Amino acid sequence: MSDRDDASEINDYSKDIEDLFISFMMSNKDLFVRCKGIIKSTYFDDRQNRDTIAFIEGYSTAFSIIPSLDEIKAVTKKDIRIMEVDAAVHGDRRLGRSGASERGQRGQGEQRSFHCDYLLG
């Protein structure tokens, strides 16, 4: 099975996948805004991740801003690692189900990126 097949057939959203999603979402305000409307804490199986998303949801709704990483850690004990988010996530280009950016599709190497609706399936 190729990498493209692997990416489009993720059926088990493990704690590692949930952690990765939270890291990407919190790494950029624009990405957070794009994901906020379709994210719910009940979508997460890991208890700490569920509590973290619930806190982020409540905080951003109450204060109209994203909580700081320090605030998240103080409340949920979750360490969130900031990720470098590929520019394709921010632009008008929509990632395919394969998760490859246009740069990867143009032959400049496979670049894995994540889009909120891609990760949520």
Image (spheres, rainbow, N blue to C red):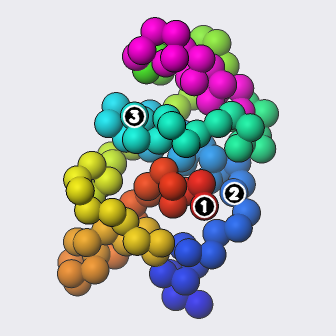
Disc 2 marks a residue whose amino acid type is Tyr
Q: Residue furthest bottom?
A: 1
- Find residue 50 and report its horizontal and vertical position in percent: 71, 33
The residue that mark 3 highlights is 33
Residue under numbered circle 2: 13
Residues at marks 2 and 1 touching, judged by CB atoms closer than 8 Å: yes
Q: Of the residues under marks 3 and 1, which one precedes in the sequence?
A: 3
Label 3–label 1 contact, CB within 8 A? no
Give the residues in magenta: 50-65
**Tag 1: residue type?**
Gly
Q: Is residue 69 left or right of residue 57?
A: left
Count neighbours of disc 2 (C-alpha within 10 A) and say few if under 14, some if 14 to 19, many if 20 or more.
Answer: some
Q: Magenta includes 59?
A: yes
Vertical side of 109 occupied by 41: above or below: above
Quadrant in which residue 32 is drawn: top left
In primary-sequence order, the first of circles 2 and 1 is 2
On screen, residue 56 above or below 90: above
- Inter-mark Cα distance, 3 to 1: 18 Å
| Mark 1 Cα-neighbour bin, 10 Å: few <14, some 14–19, many ≥20 | few
Left or right: 55 as drawn, with respect to 22: right
Could you tell me how far apart the alpha carbons at marks 3 and 2 are, in whole angstroms?
Answer: 22 Å
Residue 61 placement (x, y as % from top left):
51, 17
Give the number of marks: 3
Could you tell me residue 22's position as x and y percent? 54, 39
Quickly name the residue at label 1. Answer: 121
Q: Amino acid at mark 3?
A: Val
Q: Residue at x 56, y 23 (%)?
A: 56
**Quadrant the N terminus occupies:** bottom right
Percent coordinates x, y for residue 47 in the rendering? 78, 33
Mark 3 burial class by Cα count in 10 Å: few <14, some 14-19, many 20+: some
Magenta stretch, main secondary structure, is: helix
Q: Residue at x 47, y 72 (%)?
A: 97
